[in-house]
């Protein structure tokens, strides 16, 4: 049983990644779709009680946001994995501008989430952590977490101030 938590600002590919990697095996828990925390909790509780693997496809920018899923998942015996979606803010804003209707977030909102974003850490209760980014060919690249986020690798070329 897996509890997978996505972490990253809007327009970094989280929902597309879910569709490509987990659609056939995991229930998608997404606040945009469910609309309220009450509905989200009902679906989370159902997955935990049924032993059904799930993905939390939200921004989950802070430790506080993530613990609402990690604590009950660990208590129910789930393995907890985190996927940190990294992207230059400029690329996320560009992808966001291509969205239609309600899926497009105001630029100020994307920037606010970017500044709120806290790197995940194993101390939160994760069993495994990964970096995810979109390469120049629009393909997802997944790399194991190294040294609690201090790894100097391809994803760190994305660090920019927005």
Image: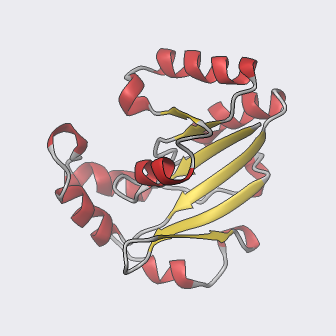
Where the N terminus falls, by quadrant?
top right
| Placement of 49 over or under 91, stated as above or below | above
The quadrant in which residue 33 appears is: top left
| Placement of 51 over or under 88, stated as above or below | above
* For residue 25, side relative to residue 161 (left or right): right
* For residue 161, side relative to residue 68 (left or right): left
* For residue 68, side relative to residue 124 (left or right): left
Q: Residue at image x 21%, y 47%?
A: 104
- Front-lying residue, 71 or 115: 71
Coloration mode? secondary structure
Where residue 18 sits in the image (x, y, percent)? Answer: 50, 48
The quadrant in which residue 13 appears is: bottom left
The quadrant in which residue 153 appears is: bottom right
Q: Residue at image x 59%, y 60%?
A: 119
Where the C terminus falls, by quadrant?
bottom left
* For residue 54, side relative to residue 29 (left or right): right
Where residue 30 sits in the image (x, y, percent)? Answer: 46, 33
Q: Residue at image x 44%, y 71%?
A: 139
Where residue 84 sits in the image (x, y, percent)? Answer: 56, 59
Q: Residue at image x 23%, y 52%?
A: 108
Where residue 147 sits in the image (x, y, percent)? Answer: 75, 73
């Amino acid at each position: 049983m897996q509890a997978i938590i996505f972490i990253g600002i809007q327009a970094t590919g989280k929902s597309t990644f879910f569709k490509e990697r987990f659609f056939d095996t995991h229930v998608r828990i997404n606040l945009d779709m469910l609309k309220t925390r009450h509905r989200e909790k009902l679906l989370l509780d159902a997955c935990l009680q049924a032993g059904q693997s799930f993905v939390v496809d939200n921004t989950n920018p802070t430790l506080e946001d993530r613990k609402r899923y990690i604590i009950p998942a660990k208590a129910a015996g789930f393995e907890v994995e985190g996927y940190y979606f990294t992207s230059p803010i400029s690329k996320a804003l560009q992808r966001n501008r291509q969205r239609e209707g309600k899926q497009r977030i105001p630029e100020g909102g994307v920037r606010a989430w970017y500044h709120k974003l806290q790197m995940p850490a194993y101390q939160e209760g994760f069993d495994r952590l990964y970096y995810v980014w979109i390469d120049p060919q629009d393909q997802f690249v997944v790399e194991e977490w190294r040294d609690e986020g201090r790894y100097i690798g391809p994803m760190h070329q994305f660090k920019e101030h927005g």
